[in-house]
Image (tube, rainbow, N blue to C red):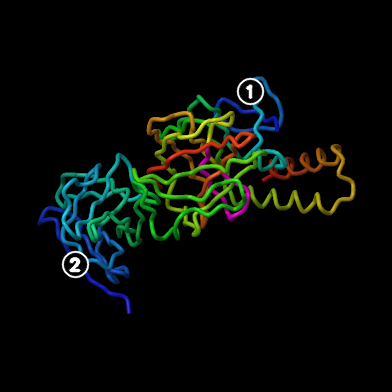
Amino acid sequence: MAYESIIVRRGGSNLNYKVVGGTSAPSSPSNNTIWVNTSTAITSHVFSATKPTSPSAGMVWFEVNTSSPAPINARKDKNVLYIYPVNCMQYVSSAWVAKTAKVYQDGAWNDFGLIVLDDGVINQSLGGLPEAVNEGFESFTITSDGALSVYTQALETAVNGYAFFPNAVDLTPYSRVEITAKGEGHGTNKAIYFIVNATKAAASAASIAISTNTSAKTTYTLDISNITGSKYLGFYGKGAANYDNVGAEVFDIRLY
Amino acid sequence: MEIYICPEYKCYTTEAEDRRAFEVPFFNGKCAALIEGYRYIPEGETWTREDGVEFAGEMISPWKDIDVLAAYQEQYEAMLGETSDSSDELLAELDAAYREGVNSV
């Protein structure tokens, strides 16, 4: 039996939202009810652009940005205070864990963004580390500095390498993917690509190049506004010949 | 495959005055109907979406519904498989037929 804990945190008499935790959506929600899909009691919540530095157990962090799939007017009176939540994480067992959150507005649940990868921690819904479709990629690992290591195989003859996270993601609510990474390899082919595809095959329907020649952390953005339904997220790469591989360290992947 | 992009970075399979040519292996084996539903942002260039979000290249992403484009490609490959003559002339005829069909919608 799934554990259910419904904790209601009201924002005060003038605030126009409430936060509810539980493993199933509230059955009769009021407008601007934020449901966090969690089995861990919510002890507090924070809306901020950056992760809280001194979290307490059970705290929920709603990451905010300048736009959101689910903007919320937080005030009940004639004044307006829009907040733009894009992602949700909860501090569980001394670590931040990505959580699915939705807000009930005008009779429907609207999704926030989705954290696929956060400082090397993969959202559990993705099913684990990416898996190579062919011999083009080495095994994927998480490095000691909190990154997903993405390296092509060092082969005498380079091949087009493809790899995907095990589980698909419904991309319908989102219009872009942001990937933060830095290059760690070299070679005549200068990029690892973040890709999207309908199946876990050696193919891609959309891609954004992650430069392997850039050693500084850089954020890359892929337009997915015309990609809907369940799709697989992954990587494409091709090293150079004569055992010269290319790679990148990927720190964050977020859908907005 | 050589494709052409307009100032809005939409892809085309034919030349025109305001279009630039690029060799993009991603489009190898793809039918015209699919190619012309994509955007290609070359490395070093940036496209700004209607909502103000910027996308720097090298990026390849659809501006038409990806599932519709995939269906075009599936039909194209099925037709290729059914024909015994796979000459360049026949492939060009197939592409032109698809383009005419797409443009009629």
**Label 2 neighbour load within 10 Å: few <14, some 14-19, many 20+:** some
Is A210 rendered above or below residue A127? above
Tell me, yes or no, whether the highlighted magenta stretch contains residue A237.
Answer: no
What's the residue type where badge 1 is placed?
A: Arg
Q: Chain of mark 2?
A: A
Q: Position of residue A192 (x, y in %)?
A: 52, 38
Q: Residue at x 84, y 54 (%)?
A: B82
**Which residue lies under the disc numbered 1?**
B20
Q: In the image shown, does A218 or A161 lie closer to the viewer?
A: A161
Q: Position of residue A209 (x, y in %)?
A: 51, 35
Q: Position of residue A204 (x, y in %)?
A: 59, 46
What's the residue type where badge 2 is placed?
A: Ile
Q: Secondary structure at mark 2?
A: loop
Region rendered in magenta = A192-206
Residue B82 seen in this snapshot:
yes
Q: In the image shown, does A96 or A104 lie closer to the viewer?
A: A96
**Which residue lies under the disc numbered 2?**
A7
Q: Position of residue A228 (x, y in %)?
A: 51, 52
